Image: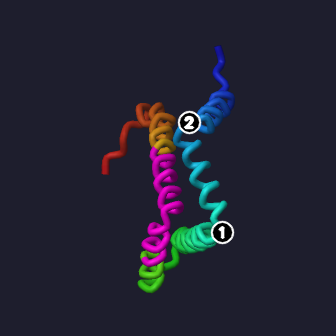
């Protein structure tokens, strides 16, 4: 019997959307978006985060001033209970995705082994 990996992936997508972690994430995101001040703060944080990630991916140095500004921004957004709750939900969802990725990659790990450095 041939297995269609894409059908299995679509089924996994459905299961993820039905998971408690995803439901909590969508609820937390909706709460942030319903609060205009929290939404502006979160959008600003995300923009800064994406700019820094883009610089890293392009091999550009991140200045000490940018690091300090990022730390201040993180501390500020974490003081907002709605954003803090959203960030915790994001972390739980990220953990789940990481664990799923490990399961998905297991056949290749078994085939090639774990790299020895």
The answer to which of 17 and 111 lies nearer the viewer is: 17
Q: Please give the label number shown on residue 36.
A: 1
Foreground label between 2 and 1 = 1
Horizontal arrangement in the rendering, residue 79 relative to residue 46 (left or right): left
Q: Tell me where residue 102 appears, x and y as whole percent.
A: 45, 39
Q: Residue drawn 58% across and 72% down?
A: 41
Mark 1: few, some, or many residues within 10 Å (few <14, many ≥20)?
A: few
Label total for image: 2
Q: Tell me where residue 66 appears, x and y as whole percent.
A: 48, 82
Q: Residue drawn 65% across and 33% down?
A: 14
Horizontal arrangement in the rendering, residue 10 relative to residue 69 (left or right): right
Q: Tell me where residue 81 appears, x and y as whole percent.
A: 48, 62
Res 22 quadrant in image: top right
Res 23 quadrant in image: top right
- Display coloring: rainbow
> If the image is split into quadrants, where does the N terminus sit?
top right
Tell me which numbered mark, 2 or 1, is placed earlier along the sequence: 2
Horizontal arrangement in the rendering, residue 115 relative to residue 69 (left or right): left
Q: Does residue 89 appear in the picture of this structure? A: yes
Q: Please give the label number shown on residue 75.
A: none
Q: Does residue 58 appear in the picture of this structure? A: no
Query: Which element type, helix, strand or loop, lies under badge 1?
Result: helix
Q: Which residue lies furthest to the bottom in this view?
A: 65
Mark 2: few, some, or many residues within 10 Å (few <14, many ≥20)?
A: few
Q: Give the range drawn in magenta.
A: 72-95
**Vertical placement of residue 59 versus 32, above or below:** below
Q: Name the residue under label 2.
A: 19
Please tell me whether the stretch drawn in magenta is mainly helix, strand or loop: helix
């Amino acid at each position: 019997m041939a297995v269609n990996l894409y059908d299995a992936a679509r089924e996994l997508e459905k299961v993820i959307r039905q998971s408690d972690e995803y439901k909590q994430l969508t609820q937390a995101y909706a709460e942030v978006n319903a609060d205009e001040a929290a939404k502006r703060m979160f959008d600003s944080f995300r923009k800064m985060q994406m700019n820094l990630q883009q610089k890293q991916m392009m091999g550009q140095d991140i200045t000490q001033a940018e690091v300090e500004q990022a730390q201040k921004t993180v501390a500020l957004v974490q003081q907002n209970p709605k954003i803090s709750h959203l960030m915790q939900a994001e972390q739980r969802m990220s953990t789940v995705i990481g664990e799923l990725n490990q399961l998905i990659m297991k056949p290749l790990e078994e085939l090639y082994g774990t790299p020895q450095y």
